[in-house]
Image (cartoon, rainbow, N blue to C red):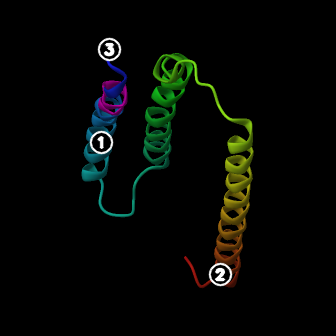
Amino acid sequence: MHPKYKIAVFLAIIVALMAPYSLFALYCYSKYPGGSYPDPINYANAILFTANLLVPALVFKKFAVKDLLGDITVDPAKMQRISKRAKKRNLRLLIVLSSLFLYGAVLTIQGKVP
């Protein structure tokens, strides 16, 4: 298979796995009036959604990444610059997401968010 199409096949697998989840969620949520869904249905939907995203991603990473990328030679100086930039970006993202989480926690404790 041409490497160009491997990503398309991966996305097609995810869509094929998400179709039953979507139909199950629509069926369950159309059966009950708004806001009164039983807990097992909510938990099952969350587990199905997570599993349908994680399982293909892990399988793809395990088997297809070596075939997709092959043997790559990398310039060490260039990789150091890229890794420094990635570390800075990740630290900034961590700070922003942590502050948003704390802001939401404070609002929840104050009772402003239901």
Q: Position of residue 43 (x, y in %)?
A: 50, 44
Q: Secondary structure at mark 2?
A: helix
* Residue drawn at 51 percent across, 33 percent down: 54
- The image quadrant that residue 93 belongs to is bottom right
Residue 68 against residue 76 in the figure, above or below: above
**Which of marks 3 and 1 precedes in the sequence?**
3
Crowdedness near tag 2: few (<14), some (14–19) or many (≥20) residues, C-alpha within 10 Å: few
Q: Dividing the image into 4 quarters, which one contains the N terminus? A: top left
Front-most of residues 4 and 91: 4
* Residue drawn at 54 percent across, 25 percent down: 61
Q: Position of residue 71 (x, y in %)?
A: 57, 18
Residue 77 against residue 20 in the figure, above or below: below
Q: Which residue is mark 1?
A: 22
What residue span does the magenta drawing correspond to? Answer: 5-12
Crowdedness near tag 3: few (<14), some (14–19) or many (≥20) residues, C-alpha within 10 Å: few
* Residue drawn at 24 percent across, 52 percent down: 30
Q: Amino acid at mark 1?
A: Ser
Q: Amino acid at mark 2?
A: Leu
Q: Dividing the image into 4 quarters, which one contains the C terminus? A: bottom right
Q: Secondary structure at mark 3?
A: loop
Q: Are marks 2 and 1 in contact (CB under 8 Å)?
A: no
Q: Which residue is mark 3?
A: 1
Q: Position of residue 113 (x, y in %)?
A: 57, 79
Residue 20 lies in the magenta-colored region: no
Image disc number at residue 107: 2
